[in-house]
Image (cartoon, rainbow, N blue to C red):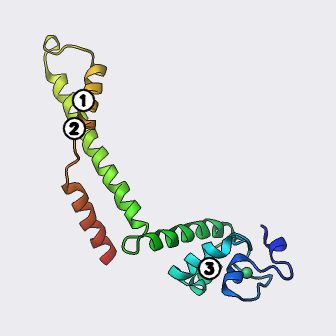
Amino acid sequence: MASSTSTGVGSPCGACKFLRRRCTQECVFAPYFDSEQSPAQFAAIHKVFGASNVSKLLAQLPVHLRCDAVVTVAYEAQARIRDPVYGCVAHIFALQKQVAILQAQLMQVKAQLAYQATLPQAANGGSDGDRVLMQLQVMGCKEEPHHHFGELHAMAQRLMRS
Ligand SMILES: [Zn+2]
């Protein structure tokens, strides 16, 4: 950890520099916020979560998990500032939508393969591999059904309310 070097006399950590307070040896932010680049990053965290809340959150965590917590809190804060309505949940929705589309495509390919397996061998030309490739190409051009996102969105909102 860089805390022993970055909290020397006269060099507060990035968080304390932003908060204009004295940085002590016990400062919970010091290992993760350097004096030069971090004040701006900490500004976003303070704006969204409040320095005091983040300080309490870090203090409750085992030391070896604090670095990950700082990284994710910074990510969430920046996402919330960019998108005040959805924050990083916008990314989650987009990924859920992608998963739903891919699952639907996979089911279509499986259904197509199952159907073609029932046909007499003479009636369908080309290898199985060719047919799968053709099927994937056809589906790649398709517009995804619109209702997937609507359903996910409604589900996510129900989850957030409960
Ligand atoms: Zn500090």
Tag 2 residue: 108
Where 39 falls versus 50 (above or below)? above
Q: CA distance from mark 1 to mark 3?
A: 52 Å
Q: Residue at x 19, y 50 (%)?
A: 145
Question: Which of pointers 1 and 2 lies earlier in the amino acid sequence?
Answer: 2
The image quarter containing residue 116 is: top left
Crowd class of label 2 (few under 14; some 14 to 19; many from 20; radius 10 Å): some
Tag 3 residue: 60
Tag 1 residue: 135
Q: CA distance from mark 2 to mark 3?
A: 48 Å
Q: Residue at x 36, y 74 (%)?
A: 85
- Residue 147 shows in this picture: yes
Classify mark 3: helix, strand or loop: helix
Q: Tell whether 37 sits left or right of 50.
A: right
Point out the quarter of the image occupied by ligand 1.
bottom right
- Residue 162 shows in this picture: no
In the depicted view, which residue is nearer to us: 121 or 137? 137
